[in-house]
Amino acid sequence: MTKFDKGIGRRSVLKGMAATAGLSTLGMPSIVRAQSAGTVVMGTWGGDYARLLNKNIEQPFLIDKGWDVIQDQAGDPERRAKMMAERRLPTGTTDVQGLNGPNMYQVYELGLTQPIQYDKIPNAKNMLPSMKYEYGVGHIYSAMVPVYNPDVIPEAEAPTSYKDVFDPKWGDKLGIIDIQYQYTIVAAALAAGAGVTGFKEGEELLMKVREAGCRIYPTNEAFAQGLKAGEIGVGIMWKARVVQWQNAGIPVKAAWPSEGAISYVSGFVVPKNAPHPEGAWAYINAMLEPAAQENFAIDMGYNPTVTNANVAPDLNERIGFKPEEVEKLNNMDYGAILEHDVELKTWWDREFKA
């Protein structure tokens, strides 16, 4: 694997994915701004992720050192559309964008973002090689696994594969997440035995569970509430999220899928027309600080992308992966996703959700 591999290696991934929120710091116009280290505008999802960016990265490693940090919060489709609309402008409105793996790849292939300048990111020397891409920098990673509520699904019937999850027998006890359409179609394709690019086979299987009455939730959080309330008993989700939900008292367990889990990477990209490119490199460097990575593991259950982060053994047991699980990891084909994304989303919205 090359240093700037555009794909994510099967074994190396686990060895080693709107409105401006406002300034995170507001100082006196003359004195504080004169001392400012610079400005950085971060495009991100809202909710817990935005809050934890501020808590674990922005406040300790940027704001406290004089940087003015602005969060531009929106869903990633809206932020990618905004980047596309701004592509011909000499200066855009964001310096860094947080996206999942397929979408980091997509915006780079569309010519919206620039190659990562790792020589401007000192902490990059500690990164897992598999998390250093030409098109983006990996922030956190996990994998998509079957999940179930043991109060709803008896342990004897607990899913041990994607095929078990996408079984029409569950009826309305199966929950599916709208914003996870890409990963859900790929997981269904694996369940159908068609591989990560077997989109048609995945769609056919999903139509069967839809006809059987599966529930569709708009967000990960809504899905979690459905589990908690016992409306649903089974579905798929990132292993990291399962840890978060368990910490919040939601009755949920995870299993490793026999087909091999789908990897998940979330990271940062830099638009070609970033208004404050030096702020972008400073932000990414702060993201790679060991303490920032350690705290994301604690707060969100995702694995660090640097080798010098210290994750407690008991936490690593909950969020990490066994060697045999790493061996069976399935990686999204980013090129195929990019090529077929419009038709996949059209099918999802007009047929599956209809």
Image (spheres, rainbow, N blue to C red):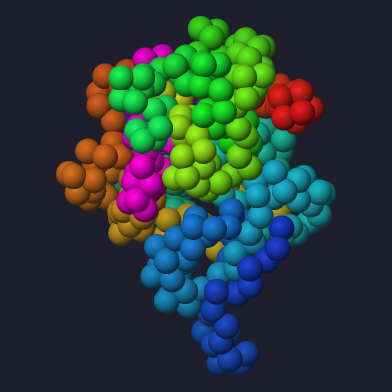
**How far across and how far down the image is residue 4, in percent?**
48, 32
Instruction: Say whether residue 105 is visible.
Output: no
Q: Seen in the image, is 154 located left or right of residue 203?
A: left
Q: Is residue 68 above or below residue 231?
A: below
**How far across and how far down the image is residue 302, in percent?**
37, 44
Q: Seen in the image, is 14 located left or right of residue 51?
A: left
| Residue at the spot 61% in from the left edge and 39% down from the top edge | 217
In what quadrant of the picture does the N terminus appear? top left
Instruction: Say whether residue 56 is visible.
Output: yes
- Labels in figure, total: 0
In what quadrant of the picture does the C terminus appear? top right
Kindly give the residue lying farthest to the left in the view shown.
313
Q: Seen in the image, is 214 located left or right of residue 127?
A: right
| Residue at the spot 28% in from the left edge and 43% down from the top edge | 307
Looking at the rendering, the stretch of residues picked out in magenta corresponds to 238-259
| Residue at the spot 42% in from the left edge and 76% down from the top edge | 64
| Residue 108 position by quadrant | top right
| Residue at the spot 58% in from the left edge and 57% down from the top edge | 46
**How far across and how far down the image is residue 256, in percent?**
34, 24
| Residue 21 position by quadrant | bottom right
Residue 240 lies in magenta, yes or no? yes
Q: Is residue 169 above or below residue 247?
A: above
